[in-house]
Image (cartoon, helix red, strand yellow):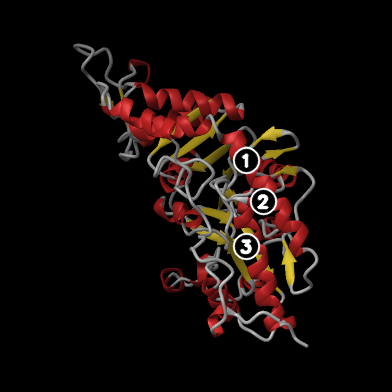
Amino acid sequence: MERLAVHGGYPVRSSALYYGRQWIGEEDIRAVVDVLHSDFITCGPKVDELECTLEEYTGARYAVAVCNGTAALHCACMAAGVGPGDEVITTPITFAASANCALYCGATPVFADIDPETYNIDPESIRTRITEKTKAVVAVDFTGQAVKHKEIRAICDEFDLVFIEDAAHAIATKYDGKPVGSLADITCFSFHPVKTVTGGEGGAVLTNKEEYYHKLTLVRTHGITHDEAYMEDAPHEGPWCYEQVCLGYNYRITDFQAALITSQMKKLNAFAARRKEIVSAYDEAFAKIPEIIVQKEIPESDTCRHLYIVRLALDKLTCTRREFFDAMAAENIHCQIHYVPVYWFPYYRKLGYQKGLCPKAEEVYKGIMSVPLYPKMTNKDVADVIHAVKKVVAYYRIK
């Protein structure tokens, strides 16, 4: 048995490997520099170009680019008409923004439990959380795997709810052969550096409904319009006039960020293919280890995985998750935990949420850990991750 690095042995590798990382090429840098030399570095043509690129890639009728994924979720809730007194159902195994977006609008997040095999929100749990106050469902494509669209769509149609898809993890994923972004009432993307394509920061909201699109363009930019068709006091004196017709925010994205994302989009299919190769290698290796539980996928989801989750079967190991995590770090494989159940945070506790709301999610959380996954990883990097997991499992395996 190999001695663990955390106990004085030799690490699997000499350099650190982190769970996620962007891949910026020279062509991406040139795209940004070109914008910096141009007349418009914000509110210019590159934002329109990005929106057209997203529409073409996903098949959505409309795309609205914003400054980050959280802003996208907030805009989505505002476009959906979420407000004080409403309830919005979402999953606890997600980044806080998936629930916070409801709070921003004065609404109440309601947490539905997850499928313990796929880790995505369970449609049947959604159904049990619906009340007369429910306005929308924010369904998160956790790790990049598509949620159960058919089931969630049927529930939303039955109860007249807005289906918002938090696809921050899921650009390039397809459901039943159709790209994520064209399926839900409103879909949100994130372009944070650890996502499949990045703008440093950035986000987008996609929809097929003109009504939502109009609201999105307003709330992104202070609630201001230059279009006389939507003005209340038109006609005006001249083309310089505009009106604020609702309360919006400054959620605009810059042209140099938009140019970077558009450049990255040209490589999206290649990035997705490499991620799938790595996931396949991990699945094959970890399926043979009884102490590791591999995330299952629904057959409808052709997934571009943003995260790769290993779930530790802690009843078969002599270590805690923290000890496993630290042992991996000592091997120079730096993992992360995605995510602490949102309602466990002190802020939510002060709002009255308590542990025990979603027992399946809480049980899954105890053992999950994200290992490195990004397209720039070499085959040697992938082999090192597999080696480290096997090494740590072997050391802590119950004999």
Q: Nearer the viewer, residue 201 or 275?
A: 275
Mark 3 and mark 2 lie on one chain; the one further toward the N terminus is 2
Residue appearing at x 54%, y 44% in the figure: 196
Residue 24 seen: yes
Q: Earlier in the sequence, mark 1 or mark 3?
A: 1
* Residue carrying label 3: 384
Residue indicated by mark 1: 272
Q: Is residue 205 left or right of residue 285?
A: left
Quarter of the view holding residue 391? bottom right
Lower position in the chain sequence, tag 2 or tag 1: 1
Vertically, is 360 above or below 48?
A: below
Which residue is drawn at the image coordinates 57% and 35% (left, top)?
268
Identify which amino acid the numbered label 2 is placed on. Ile
Relative to 4, residue 258 above or below:
above
Pointer 2: what residue? 278
* x, y percent for residue 210: 52, 25
Q: Position of residue 46 (x, y in %)?
A: 38, 25
Quarter assignment of residue 184:
top right
Q: Position of residue 345 (x, y in %)?
A: 46, 71
Mark 2 is surrounded, within 10 Å at the Cα level, by few (under 14), some (14 to 19) or many (20 or more) other residues, namely: many
SS category of the residue bearing label 2:
helix
Q: Quadrant of the N terminus?
A: bottom right
Picture coordinates of residue 241 (x, y %)? 22, 19
Q: Secondary structure at mark 3?
A: helix
Q: CA distance from mark 2 to mark 1?
A: 10 Å
Q: Hey, what amino acid is under mark 3? A: Asp
